[in-house]
Amino acid sequence: MKERVLHLPRLLVRLDENPGRAGSRYEELRRRLILFFRLKQPADAEQLADEVLDRVARRVAEGLEILKIEAYVLGVARFVLREQEGTAQSAARALSDLAREQQIEMSDAPADPSSEEHQEALGRCLEELTPADRSMILNYYAAEGSGRINQRQTMARKLGINLNALHNRALRLRKQLEQCVARRTHQARER
Amino acid sequence: VDKVPISALTDLLLHKLSPAQAALLEDRIVQDGEVADLLEVATHDLIDDYAAARLDPEDARRVEEHVLATPDGPARVVFARALSQQQVKNAASIGRGFGNPHSPILPVALAASALIIAALVLLPGRDGVLRRAPTPPGTAAPEATRSRPSPNENGLADSVFTVALLSSQTRGAALPPVDIPSGASLVRIQCEIPPAGSDSRYHLTLKDEVNDTVLSLDALRSRQVGGIHFIEASIEASRLRPGRYRLTVYSDVHSAIPTVEQEFDLQTKNRN
């Protein structure tokens, strides 16, 4: 951890000389790495993403010239993945199986005791959004099946934005709602 | 740079691609933020479909194994279910029906009649008495707002009018009629049914007051949104005349006993 702190500033400067933008780029790289590792090692994705960034930061601190940072990060990610698959395959599978069993138990439960609590929390979190955002998020995720693409394209057109911008707004709002629900349910349990 | 279709990312998440295809997409995810965004979109859609039991068993198994095996996987499913419930509430409150975002209702419905329609429950009780929901407050609207379609809050002009027939309601008095607004070209009828296996098929008939069949459909599959199981059928608005209609759903085309039977009065006085 101490080593990581020592190496991180050099990586941030390499990402962008503006500290604010460098922080954003770092978080964006981390997000993409988490998504990458979730495809292969879902239980350890965040930890592996941090491991990759640590290794890249160390190499940058050692003075390595990296022309395309994303390409280099990808190479390290693949290397870390091979290491992980090679050394801890059985352990990872066991963890994954365990998580899956827990998931199946959860999805089979006829009445999830936390569902009402989440439902109520989400209702309150939705009330905190502006009417336009509330309407947008409910409509965006109400689409289902093969109709999703067409409906979202129509929605984007009518809102005067492109589809990617619509996706981004939905992702941002969903994340905001997930965090709000987690906070509210946590607070409710602490009371 | 080629665009990546969401369907390809869905296949990637479900581990349905060849290793070479998967590797190409994985590279794009790390190197292209837009592709990473799309992967998140595809992930949310898959979790929502899983939570609503819209996936076939094999895909559901793959989602459990590959998408939900993260520490926050169970919480994401709980959130998806809560969101789905909110959508049902939202749909019922503005007359959109189950699982239909913005296709779909006339704005006049937002103002008045669809609010009543969505709250209607015409499911016969055991004693054969029709039941309806209490009409939600604020359903009355100025007549002027019923005159013609206008864009809804997302700027969408709609031409499909949804009639959502729910079953879990309280006994009421006279049934408010379903008033199809002018401009509606298609009427979508969604009828709640008891939960059944995902491979169940239903037969639906809609008969008018002289018992003429105006719609008959076989092999309808049920859908589920937010815990409500329903089947859906659409009919051109021009085929519907004012009067009383009886909608009957059978679990099998040869079955003699209806699974659900509902009646409703239809008005089309505002149609051009």
Image: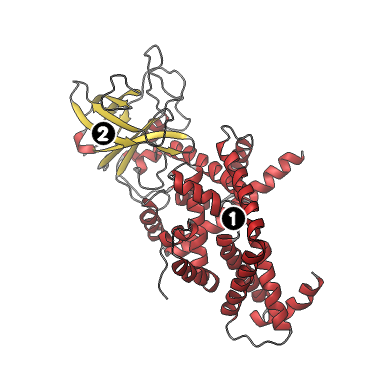
Q: Quadrant of the C terminus of chain A?
A: top right
> Up-down: is A39 above or below B228?
below
Can you tell which of label 1 and label 2 is closer to the viewer? 2
Residue, disc 1? A175
Please state the chain letter of the residue tagged with numbered disc 2 in the rendered image: B
Q: Where is mark 2, residue-wise?
A: B218
Type of amino acid at the residue the image marks with label 2: Asp
Residue A165 falls left or right of residue B175: right
Residue at horizontal 64 percent and vertical 79 percent from the top: A15
Label 2 crowding class (10 Å Cα cut-off): few <14, some 14-19, many 20+? some
Image side of residue B53 versus residue B175, left or right = right
Residue B32 percent location from the top left of the image: 51, 72
Q: Is residue B244 above or below residue B39?
A: above
Q: What residue appears at the point 44 percent right and 62 percent down from the top-left corner?
A: B17
Label 2: element kind: strand
Choose between B53 and B169: the one closer to the eye.
B53
Q: Position of residue B126 (x, y in %)?
A: 41, 14
| Residue under the image location 28 percent in, 28 percent down | B266
Given residues A165 and A68, the one toward you in this image is: A68
Crowding near the residue tagged with mark 1, few <14, some 14–19, many ≥20 C-alpha atoms within 10 Å: few
- The percent position of residue B162, horizontal first and vertical second, equals 34, 38
Looking at the rendered structure, the kind of residue marked 1 is: Lys
| Viewer-proximal residue among B251 and A19 | B251
Q: Quadrant location of the N terminus of chain A?
A: bottom right
> Label 1 vs label 2: CA separation?
41 Å
Check the residue under mark 1 and report the chain it is in: A
- Whether callout 1 and callout 2 share a subunit is answered no
Corner quadrant of residue B240: top left
Give the answer, above or below, for where B201 lies relative to A62.
above
Question: Where is residue A37 drawn, in percent x and y?
Answer: 59, 64
